[in-house]
Amino acid sequence: MKPISRFAPSPTGYLHLGHAYAARIAYETAREKGGTFLLRHEDIDTSRVRPEFFAAIEEDLKWLGLNWDGEPLIQSTRIAAYEEVLEKLKSMGLLYPCFCTRKEIQATINSISNAPQDGAEQTYPKTCHRMSQKKVDQKIRNGESHSWRFDSEKAAEIHGPLTFNDLERGETGIDISINGDVVLARKDVGIAYHLAVVVDDEFQDVTHVTRGEDLFFATHVQRQLQEILGYREPIYRHHELINDEDGNRLAKRHDSLAIKTLRERGFSPAEVLDMI
Ligand code: GLU
Protein backbone atom coordinates (compact mmCIF):
# COMPACT_ATOMS: atom_id res chain seq x y z
CA MET A 1 0.00 0.00 0.00
CA LYS A 2 1.31 3.45 -0.89
CA PRO A 3 1.85 5.77 2.07
CA ILE A 4 -0.35 8.76 2.76
CA SER A 5 1.33 11.31 5.01
CA ARG A 6 0.40 14.78 6.14
CA PHE A 7 1.86 18.02 7.40
CA ALA A 8 -0.55 19.64 9.85
CA PRO A 9 0.58 23.10 10.94
CA SER A 10 -1.53 25.51 12.94
CA PRO A 11 -1.84 28.84 11.12
CA THR A 12 -0.75 30.85 14.15
CA GLY A 13 2.60 32.08 12.82
CA TYR A 14 5.15 31.80 10.04
CA LEU A 15 6.81 28.46 9.38
CA HIS A 16 10.33 28.18 10.78
CA LEU A 17 13.11 25.69 10.22
CA GLY A 18 11.51 23.20 12.61
CA HIS A 19 8.34 23.16 10.54
CA ALA A 20 10.32 22.83 7.33
CA TYR A 21 12.02 19.77 8.82
CA ALA A 22 8.67 18.23 9.83
CA ALA A 23 7.17 19.00 6.43
CA ARG A 24 10.17 17.51 4.64
CA ILE A 25 9.95 14.27 6.60
CA ALA A 26 6.23 13.95 5.84
CA TYR A 27 6.88 14.80 2.18
CA GLU A 28 9.69 12.27 1.81
CA THR A 29 7.78 9.57 3.68
CA ALA A 30 5.14 9.76 0.97
CA ARG A 31 7.20 10.57 -2.11
CA GLU A 32 9.93 7.94 -1.58
CA LYS A 33 7.27 5.28 -2.13
CA GLY A 34 5.14 7.09 -4.69
CA GLY A 35 2.53 7.97 -2.09
CA THR A 36 0.42 11.02 -1.27
CA PHE A 37 1.45 14.05 0.79
CA LEU A 38 -1.37 16.09 2.33
CA LEU A 39 -1.57 19.51 3.92
CA ARG A 40 -3.96 20.20 6.78
CA HIS A 41 -4.47 23.57 8.43
CA GLU A 42 -5.23 22.93 12.09
CA ASP A 43 -7.13 26.12 12.76
CA ILE A 44 -9.65 25.19 15.44
CA ASP A 45 -7.99 27.37 18.09
CA THR A 46 -9.62 30.49 16.69
CA SER A 47 -8.14 32.72 19.39
CA ARG A 48 -4.63 32.17 18.01
CA VAL A 49 -5.24 31.69 14.29
CA ARG A 50 -4.64 34.62 11.93
CA PRO A 51 -5.98 34.55 8.35
CA GLU A 52 -2.75 35.67 6.70
CA PHE A 53 -0.86 32.60 7.90
CA PHE A 54 -2.80 30.13 5.73
CA ALA A 55 -1.41 31.64 2.55
CA ALA A 56 2.00 32.29 4.12
CA ILE A 57 2.38 28.62 5.07
CA GLU A 58 1.37 27.48 1.59
CA GLU A 59 3.74 29.94 -0.03
CA ASP A 60 6.68 28.75 2.09
CA LEU A 61 5.98 25.09 1.36
CA LYS A 62 5.76 25.72 -2.36
CA TRP A 63 8.96 27.74 -2.27
CA LEU A 64 10.69 24.84 -0.53
CA GLY A 65 9.39 22.50 -3.24
CA LEU A 66 7.33 20.54 -0.72
CA ASN A 67 4.21 20.42 -2.87
CA TRP A 68 1.19 18.68 -1.44
CA ASP A 69 -1.54 16.75 -3.23
CA GLY A 70 -5.10 18.04 -3.60
CA GLU A 71 -6.71 20.85 -1.66
CA PRO A 72 -5.50 21.50 1.88
CA LEU A 73 -7.96 20.35 4.53
CA ILE A 74 -9.12 23.18 6.78
CA GLN A 75 -10.26 21.96 10.17
CA SER A 76 -12.69 24.81 10.79
CA THR A 77 -14.79 23.48 7.88
CA ARG A 78 -15.15 20.12 9.62
CA ILE A 79 -16.87 21.10 12.86
CA ALA A 80 -20.01 19.07 12.06
CA ALA A 81 -17.90 15.92 11.61
CA TYR A 82 -16.16 16.46 14.96
CA GLU A 83 -19.48 17.12 16.69
CA GLU A 84 -20.88 13.89 15.34
CA VAL A 85 -17.97 11.99 16.86
CA LEU A 86 -18.40 13.82 20.16
CA GLU A 87 -22.04 12.70 20.22
CA LYS A 88 -20.98 9.15 19.56
CA LEU A 89 -18.50 9.22 22.43
CA LYS A 90 -21.13 10.75 24.70
CA SER A 91 -23.60 8.02 23.81
CA MET A 92 -20.95 5.46 24.72
CA GLY A 93 -20.61 7.15 28.13
CA LEU A 94 -16.99 8.05 27.42
CA LEU A 95 -17.25 11.81 27.89
CA TYR A 96 -18.14 13.74 31.00
CA PRO A 97 -18.68 17.46 31.46
CA CYS A 98 -16.00 19.38 33.34
CA PHE A 99 -16.85 22.73 34.91
CA CYS A 100 -13.40 23.38 36.41
CA THR A 101 -11.36 26.45 35.55
CA ARG A 102 -7.62 26.15 35.00
CA LYS A 103 -7.10 27.87 38.33
CA GLU A 104 -9.29 25.39 40.18
CA ILE A 105 -7.52 22.46 38.57
CA GLN A 106 -4.12 23.83 39.55
CA ALA A 107 -5.30 24.47 43.12
CA THR A 108 -6.54 20.88 43.42
CA ILE A 109 -3.28 19.53 42.03
CA ASN A 110 -1.27 21.66 44.46
CA SER A 111 -3.34 20.47 47.39
CA ILE A 112 -2.87 16.77 46.65
CA SER A 113 0.67 16.65 45.41
CA ASN A 114 4.06 17.13 47.00
CA ALA A 115 5.78 16.78 43.67
CA PRO A 116 7.52 19.82 42.17
CA GLN A 117 4.76 22.11 40.96
CA ASP A 118 4.93 21.76 37.27
CA GLY A 119 1.36 22.16 36.09
CA ALA A 120 2.15 21.11 32.53
CA GLU A 121 3.09 17.60 33.59
CA GLN A 122 0.06 17.02 35.77
CA THR A 123 -3.08 15.36 34.57
CA TYR A 124 -6.62 16.39 35.44
CA PRO A 125 -7.48 15.32 39.01
CA LYS A 126 -10.90 14.04 37.86
CA THR A 127 -12.82 16.41 40.11
CA CYS A 128 -15.88 16.51 37.87
CA HIS A 129 -15.75 12.76 37.31
CA ARG A 130 -16.72 12.40 40.98
CA MET A 131 -19.61 14.87 40.77
CA SER A 132 -23.09 13.48 41.38
CA GLN A 133 -25.40 13.27 38.38
CA LYS A 134 -27.83 15.55 40.22
CA LYS A 135 -25.23 18.28 40.55
CA VAL A 136 -24.10 17.87 36.95
CA ASP A 137 -27.70 18.19 35.73
CA GLN A 138 -28.21 21.26 37.86
CA LYS A 139 -25.09 22.96 36.55
CA ILE A 140 -26.02 22.21 32.96
CA ARG A 141 -29.55 23.54 33.59
CA ASN A 142 -27.98 26.71 34.97
CA GLY A 143 -26.03 27.08 31.76
CA GLU A 144 -22.60 26.78 33.44
CA SER A 145 -19.93 26.62 30.79
CA HIS A 146 -18.10 23.32 30.59
CA SER A 147 -15.70 21.30 28.53
CA TRP A 148 -16.08 17.57 27.83
CA ARG A 149 -13.39 15.20 29.04
CA PHE A 150 -12.50 11.73 27.86
CA ASP A 151 -12.99 9.01 30.47
CA SER A 152 -9.70 7.30 29.74
CA GLU A 153 -10.14 4.52 32.31
CA LYS A 154 -13.55 3.54 31.07
CA ALA A 155 -12.22 3.58 27.51
CA ALA A 156 -9.32 1.32 28.53
CA GLU A 157 -11.79 -1.16 30.02
CA ILE A 158 -13.47 -1.33 26.62
CA HIS A 159 -10.41 -1.56 24.38
CA GLY A 160 -8.00 -3.50 26.63
CA PRO A 161 -4.20 -3.47 26.18
CA LEU A 162 -3.12 -1.34 23.25
CA THR A 163 0.10 -0.37 21.49
CA PHE A 164 1.31 1.87 18.72
CA ASN A 165 4.19 1.44 16.37
CA ASP A 166 6.73 4.24 16.20
CA LEU A 167 9.46 4.00 13.59
CA GLU A 168 11.95 5.70 15.95
CA ARG A 169 11.05 4.01 19.23
CA GLY A 170 9.38 0.78 18.19
CA GLU A 171 6.28 -0.86 19.61
CA THR A 172 5.01 1.22 22.51
CA GLY A 173 2.39 0.15 25.05
CA ILE A 174 -0.36 2.64 25.81
CA ASP A 175 -0.19 4.16 29.27
CA ILE A 176 -3.40 5.97 30.11
CA SER A 177 -1.88 7.71 33.12
CA ILE A 178 0.27 9.87 30.82
CA ASN A 179 -2.55 12.06 29.56
CA GLY A 180 -5.30 11.23 32.02
CA ASP A 181 -8.73 12.52 31.08
CA VAL A 182 -8.00 15.04 28.34
CA VAL A 183 -10.45 17.63 27.06
CA LEU A 184 -12.01 16.61 23.74
CA ALA A 185 -14.44 19.55 23.52
CA ARG A 186 -13.08 22.84 24.78
CA LYS A 187 -15.22 25.34 26.66
CA ASP A 188 -14.31 28.13 24.28
CA VAL A 189 -14.14 26.57 20.81
CA GLY A 190 -16.18 23.38 21.28
CA ILE A 191 -13.53 21.04 19.82
CA ALA A 192 -10.06 20.06 20.98
CA TYR A 193 -6.87 19.05 19.21
CA HIS A 194 -6.81 15.33 20.14
CA LEU A 195 -10.29 14.80 18.74
CA ALA A 196 -9.84 16.76 15.52
CA VAL A 197 -6.50 15.18 14.67
CA VAL A 198 -7.76 11.62 15.14
CA VAL A 199 -10.94 12.23 13.16
CA ASP A 200 -9.04 13.86 10.30
CA ASP A 201 -6.25 11.30 10.09
CA GLU A 202 -8.96 8.68 9.57
CA PHE A 203 -10.97 10.89 7.21
CA GLN A 204 -7.90 11.56 5.05
CA ASP A 205 -6.79 7.88 5.05
CA VAL A 206 -3.45 8.85 6.60
CA THR A 207 -1.19 5.82 6.90
CA HIS A 208 1.91 7.61 8.28
CA VAL A 209 1.73 10.20 11.04
CA THR A 210 5.10 11.95 11.12
CA ARG A 211 5.53 14.80 13.60
CA GLY A 212 7.84 16.15 16.27
CA GLU A 213 8.70 14.06 19.31
CA ASP A 214 6.98 16.66 21.51
CA LEU A 215 3.76 14.94 20.41
CA PHE A 216 4.96 11.42 21.23
CA PHE A 217 2.95 11.30 24.46
CA ALA A 218 -0.15 12.65 22.74
CA THR A 219 -0.20 9.44 20.74
CA HIS A 220 -1.15 7.44 23.83
CA VAL A 221 -4.57 9.04 24.02
CA GLN A 222 -4.96 9.37 20.26
CA ARG A 223 -4.50 5.60 19.87
CA GLN A 224 -7.19 5.06 22.50
CA LEU A 225 -9.57 7.23 20.53
CA GLN A 226 -8.79 5.46 17.26
CA GLU A 227 -9.46 2.09 18.82
CA ILE A 228 -12.70 3.17 20.48
CA LEU A 229 -13.96 4.71 17.24
CA GLY A 230 -12.98 1.71 15.12
CA TYR A 231 -10.45 3.74 13.10
CA ARG A 232 -7.37 2.41 11.36
CA GLU A 233 -4.02 2.58 13.15
CA PRO A 234 -1.39 4.68 11.38
CA ILE A 235 2.34 4.09 11.58
CA TYR A 236 4.04 6.82 13.61
CA ARG A 237 7.33 8.55 13.32
CA HIS A 238 8.04 11.09 16.03
CA HIS A 239 11.19 12.80 14.85
CA GLU A 240 13.64 14.90 16.82
CA LEU A 241 13.02 18.63 17.09
CA ILE A 242 15.28 21.30 15.70
CA ASN A 243 16.79 23.57 18.34
CA ASP A 244 18.15 27.08 18.11
CA GLU A 245 21.84 27.81 18.66
CA ASP A 246 21.29 27.81 22.45
CA GLY A 247 19.70 24.40 22.38
CA ASN A 248 16.18 25.73 22.93
CA ARG A 249 13.24 24.48 20.99
CA LEU A 250 12.33 26.60 17.99
CA ALA A 251 9.14 28.56 18.39
CA LYS A 252 7.18 30.88 16.19
CA ARG A 253 8.83 33.83 17.91
CA HIS A 254 12.17 32.86 16.31
CA ASP A 255 11.64 35.24 13.44
CA SER A 256 15.25 34.97 12.35
CA LEU A 257 14.70 31.32 11.55
CA ALA A 258 11.37 31.82 9.81
CA ILE A 259 11.40 30.50 6.26
CA LYS A 260 10.02 33.84 5.10
CA THR A 261 12.98 35.70 6.66
CA LEU A 262 15.53 33.32 5.19
CA ARG A 263 13.89 33.67 1.82
CA GLU A 264 14.00 37.45 2.03
CA ARG A 265 17.65 37.30 3.05
CA GLY A 266 18.43 35.61 -0.25
CA PHE A 267 18.86 31.95 0.76
CA SER A 268 17.81 29.40 -1.85
CA PRO A 269 15.33 26.59 -1.08
CA ALA A 270 18.18 24.08 -1.31
CA GLU A 271 20.25 26.07 1.19
CA VAL A 272 17.34 26.23 3.63
CA LEU A 273 16.67 22.51 3.30
CA ASP A 274 20.38 21.97 3.85
CA MET A 275 20.22 23.80 7.19
CA ILE A 276 17.98 21.08 8.49
N1 GLU B 1 -1.11 21.06 14.57
C1 GLU B 1 -0.12 20.46 15.38
C2 GLU B 1 1.05 21.40 15.53
O1 GLU B 1 1.18 22.35 14.77
C3 GLU B 1 0.41 19.16 14.79
C4 GLU B 1 -0.55 18.06 14.95
C5 GLU B 1 -0.06 16.70 14.51
O2 GLU B 1 0.85 16.57 13.68
O3 GLU B 1 -0.62 15.73 14.98
O4 GLU B 1 1.83 21.22 16.44
Image: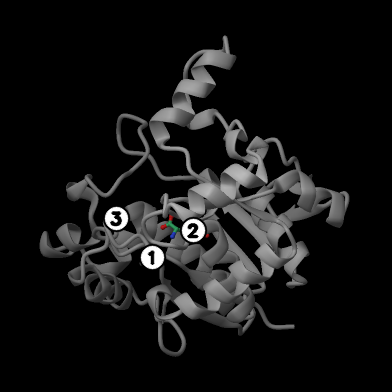
Please give the residue where the numbered disc 1 appears in the rendered image. Answer: 44
Q: Residue farthest to the top?
A: 114
Going from N to C along the chain, the mark reached first, 2 or 3, is 3
For ligand 1, tell me if the residue under mark 2 lies within 8 Å.
Answer: yes
- x and y percent of residue 55 in the render? 23, 76
Q: Please indicate, yes or no, whether residue 146 appears anywhere in the rendered image.
A: yes
Where is residue 117 drawn, in percent x and y? Answer: 47, 17
Where is mark 2, residue-wise? 193
Instruction: Relative to 197, say whether 239 is above or below.
Output: above
Instruction: Name the N-terminal-most of marks 1 and 3.
Output: 3
Q: Nearer the viewer, mark 2 or mark 3?
A: 2
Kind of residue sitting beneath label 1? Ile
Task: Report whether 24 appears left or right of 238.
Answer: left
Q: Residues within 10 Å of mark 3 (few under 14, many from 20)?
A: many
Q: Are marks 1 and 2 in contact (CB under 8 Å)?
A: yes
Mark 2–mark 3 distance (CA, rounded to whole Å): 21 Å
Q: Amino acid at mark 3?
A: His
Residue position marked by numbered label 3 in the rendering? 16
